[in-house]
Amino acid sequence: MHLKQPFWNNASSANSDSETGSESAVAELVNSLDQQRLYREVTLALRTGLREARAEFSFLRVRGLHSILKFLRSVADSDSTISLFCHTQSIPDLQVVPVLFQQSLKDAVEDESVVTDLNHIFGVEPMKIHSPSTDDEVALALRVLEGCCLLHRGSTVLAHQHNAIPVLMNILSTRGVTEQGACLDALISIMVDSSANQTDFERFNGIEEVTSLIQEKQADENLRLKCGEFLLLLIGHVNGRDRPPMARIHDDIRRLLGEKSASLIWAASQFGSTLNPEERLMALQIQARRVLESIDLY
């Protein structure tokens, strides 16, 4: 979503020598027009992307998800567009998260394209076909989910209403490396400040699944590093808590990874609180490498 400079902004700047009262009225009008224009742009971009994200065929859903992800990245550039996006997520027809779980993250076991009888051939109702989600589609949907939850905290509530944790844990245990990496990022985003999702993560033994991946020396190294980053971010977020949810996470990591690795994770999870985002990312990657090396030593 790339917004062009509206023509009325130029007109108002050309009349900068007019009276103070007129300038105030013009400025209010310009601001009002800008807000209306922004809202139309935001809702149009969402409606267009969601229409394809609801499609029956995977290639159309992928195109819609690409559009929504590009839209979310542009929205994140300013507080005003973030605020507008958050407002749109209170409108059911414009909510992104439910569409993700109803379409792209839908369990493939319940594939509607499987023919169970011939009634659709002899009846008047056409058979509804829903092509299964491809690997690229699942990874894209997870990136969109991550973006929605980071920009709009209410999306974590919507994710919980659609059983996000068990769905994502299934993806983490059954899908490929690309989807698993995107899944770990999405898990962090839906659990931040969400007690309900944290409780589900604990209930579905999420920490056991992540630690088993990072301990698998034959697994993809980038995925293992991503698991290390996940543990650092998770521990850093819940560190110091002595009550549910996630109250037992320190004991769980000590039990699963050993005392030395657990101690390193706890110490490293407090990295870079005063660093800028780029420096924090670099520090996170360095600490994740150290965690991985400590695990491989024992």
Image (cartoon, rainbow, N blue to C red):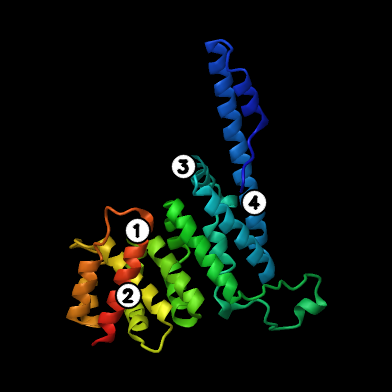
**Residue type beneath disc 4:** Arg
Label 2 sits on residue? 289
- Looking at the image, tell me whether mark 2 or mark 1 is earlier in sequence order: 1
Picture coordinates of residue 132, whole percent (x, y): 63, 76
Picture coordinates of residue 79, whole percent (x, y): 46, 42
Picture coordinates of residue 24, whole percent (x, y): 53, 17
- Looking at the image, tell me whether mark 4 or mark 1 is earlier in sequence order: 4
Whole-number angstrom distance, CA of label 2 to CA of label 3: 34 Å
Question: Taking the image as drawn, is residue 56 in sight?
Answer: no
Label 1 sits on residue? 279
The residue nearer to you, when weighing 181 against 153, is 181
In this rendering, the answer to whether 273 lies above or below 206 is above
Picture coordinates of residue 246, whole percent (x, y): 26, 67
Q: Give me the residue at 25% from left, 65% from top.
A: 269
Q: Under tag 2, what secondary structure?
A: helix
Whole-number angstrom distance, CA of label 4 to CA of label 1: 36 Å
Question: Taking the image as drawn, is residue 278 in sight?
Answer: yes
Disc assigned to residue 47: 4
